[in-house]
Amino acid sequence: MFEKTLTDVVKGIRASKRDTALYISQCIAEIKTEINSSDMYVKANALQKLTFLQMMGYSMSWASFATIEVMSSPRFAHKRIGYLAASQGFTQDTDVILLTTNLLKKELRGAIGGSMNGVYEAGLAINCVSNIVTEELAQDLLPELTNLTQHPQPYLRKKAILCLFKVFVKYPQGLRLTFAQIQNCLNDQNSAVVSCAVNVITELSDKNPRNYLHLAPAFFDLLTSSSNNWMLIKVVKLLGSLVPEEPRLARKLLEPLADIVRNTPAKSLLYEAVHAITLCLPYCRKSDGSMPASVPEIVALCAQTLKEFVEKDQNLKYLGLVGFGSLMQSHPKVLS
């Protein structure tokens, strides 16, 4: 008997437009037989087909244990199928998630030294953890994921950093235990790793920016030295959120943000820089009540930029109007 491959299933679904549900039911019946096979090739092939059908709305909760068996396979091609199936099919209520703890620990610890041995297997495990993590799993895997933020391979460092955000959502106490390691990643030699650290810290700061005020110098250095637009968007957002917590930061940010507005061709970064300037302006007054000499020029620059948003690009008109609303909080006569 020859088992259908995933390609065969896809072609069969396209060919049976009138009786698609019947065809899929037949496929699922075959999969239920194949997935109990002792042959790992047959089992992995069945799980791959079931994962595809799950994307069409069919449940695969009954195949949770078989998924773990495929995840445990020594072959990387089978592992990849198993980890993808777990990422898609496991939920917070899946009982067998507890059985994956030792397997995930083994995979995460398997990436040793500067070689590529075990690196991609650990990468699969990290991807899976970020999708299926529970509070218990977060507690158990926190040490291994934290250690990987210092791994010689940047491929694993950046994955581990991003995964830690999902861990902190389920296990907030872990943030206090490991935040120093994430902070160290802001000084990483690899720009992609730094970008991941910035993303995680920016998302964490959304609820309480005050807790991250001590990172303002590091983020200011990134603001003035980085050329990565996507990372700069996050940096600008975080620094803007810190201004109400530390008003003295406002005057220091004006010129670097104005330089971005003058020089960047990226519309997304341009808007974020203008928006951050509008957040800084209400806090720019000196102790004698006067504004810095550069403020009128910067206000005019922001007004001109927002005017172009409104007049030249229909897709950006809303952002331009929102920006004018923010700018008018500190300079009500700007539209006149």
Image: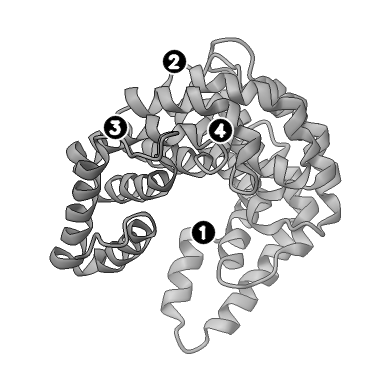
- 3D distance between C-alphas at marks 2 and 3: 27 Å
Q: Dot 3 lies on which element?
A: helix
Q: Dot 4 lies on which element?
A: helix
Residue for badge 3:
255
Looking at the image, is mark 4 or mark 3 earlier in the sequence?
4
The amino acid beneath tag 2 is Gln
Residue for badge 1:
6
Q: Is residue 62 depicted above or below 276 in this figure?
A: below
- 3D distance between C-alphas at marks 2 and 1: 42 Å
The residue nearer to you, when weighing 203 against 263, is: 263
Q: Answer few, some or many: residues within 10 Å of disc 2's Cα (few below 14, many 20 plus, some between 14 and 19).
A: few
The residue nearer to you, when weighing 95 against 7, is: 95
Looking at the image, is mark 3 or mark 1 earlier in the sequence?
1
Residue for badge 4:
159
Looking at the image, is mark 2 or mark 1 earlier in the sequence?
1
Q: Dot 1 lies on which element?
A: helix
Looking at the image, is mark 2 or mark 3 nearer the viewer?
A: 3
Res. 139 image quadrant: top right
Q: Position of residue 225 (x, y in %)?
A: 33, 22
Looking at the image, is mark 2 or mark 4 earlier in the sequence?
4
The label on residue 189 is: 2
Can you see residue 77?
yes
Looking at the image, is mark 4 or mark 3 nearer the viewer?
A: 3
The residue nearer to you, when weighing 184 against 286, is: 286
Res. 256 image quadrant: top left
Looking at the image, is mark 1 or mark 4 nearer the viewer?
A: 4
Residue drawn at point x = 42 percent, y = 78 percent: 15
